[in-house]
Structures are given as structure tokens and as C-alpha cells.
Image: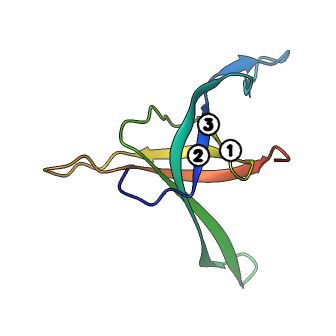
Amino acid sequence: MWALATCRASIFRGTAPSPYGDPVPNNTTPAATGVLLAVEERMARTWDPATQTPRVVRVVSGTVPSTADIRTGDRIRDDTNGVLYLVQNVTRPRTPGRTPDTVLELKRIGDDGG
């Protein structure tokens, strides 16, 4: 991994149907544990044209090693701080010479009280 890791993480994958047929995240068994993860959280300023007011939006991105099996829709738990993230987008950049880290667009969905 080329980025400086901020934590170790567990990756959760899979859904189960609810009684109404909707997919519900199945967080019982991790697909991988001990994955190095670099989380970067920054603010972005936007303008809301409907209310004519400026807004501050928090943007969370992550970086994992290129060998990590990560997919859009997976959930990542920051095992160091107990924060849960949803993977919204996965980008695997291509460069000649070396394989760069995989970049993730994350959404914070809560914490597990850890």
C-alpha cells in the first residue's frame, strides 16, 4: 500500500431478503479482516439554489491496497475507531510500472459503539 494507513478494517459483503423482499445488509460474517485502510474526511462547500444558502458537505474517501477484494455496495468497519462506511464507488487507477492503491468513495453510515 502506497498511502499511509490510518486503521485496519473489516469488509462485510452480502445481503439477505427482508420479510418484504427488500435487500438488507448482512453484517454477521466479514469477507476480509485486517485490511489496511487510509480514511480521509474533508469538507466541500456547495450552494443550495432552492434555499439560497451555502452548505458544507463532508466527503469521505478511502484507500486500500490494490490486492484488496472490495466492491461497490460492501460495508467497511474501521476496527480501530468502530465506524461503519458504505462503499459507494470503487476506482482502480491504472499506471505503467506499479499498481496504485484502490480508491474508494465512502459514506459514513454509523458506528458500532467501539
Element type where label 2 sits in the image? strand
| Total labels drawn | 3
The residue type indicated by label 3 comes to: Ser
Mark 2 or 3: in front is: 2
Q: Please report whichever mark, 2 or 1, sits nearer to the chain's N-terminal start.
A: 2
For marks 1 and 3 on the same chain, the one whose residue lies earlier in the sequence: 3
Dot 2 crowding, Cα within 10 Å, few <14, some 14–19, many 20+: some
* The label number, if any, that marks residue 53 in the structure image: none
Provide residue 68's location: percent of width, then percent of height. Answer: 43, 36
> In this view, which residue lies farthest toward the bottom?
53
Q: Position of residue 92 (x, y in %)?
A: 34, 45
**Could you give the CA–CA distance between mark 2 and mark 3, rounded to whole angstroms?**
7 Å
Residue at x 60% of width, y 65% of height: 59
Q: Amino acid at mark 1?
A: Asp
Q: Nearest the camera: 3 or 55?
A: 3
Nearer to us in this view, 62 or 22: 62
Location of mark 2 (residue): 8
Task: Please say if 47 is above or below 68.
Answer: below
Name the residue: 72% across, 53% down: 81
Q: What residue does disc 1 label?
A: 79
> Which numbered marker is on residue 10?
3
Dividing the picture into quadrants, the one containing residue 69 is top left
Q: Nearer the viewer, residue 59 or 97?
A: 97
Residue at (59, 60) in percent of width and height? 60
Q: CA distance from mark 2 to mark 1?
A: 6 Å
- Check contact, mark 2 vs mark 1: CB within 8 A: yes
Q: Position of residue 23 (x, y in %)?
A: 72, 24
Decide: is 14 above or below 4.
Answer: above
Within 10 Å of disc 3 (Cα), the crowding (few <14, some 14-19, many 20+) is some
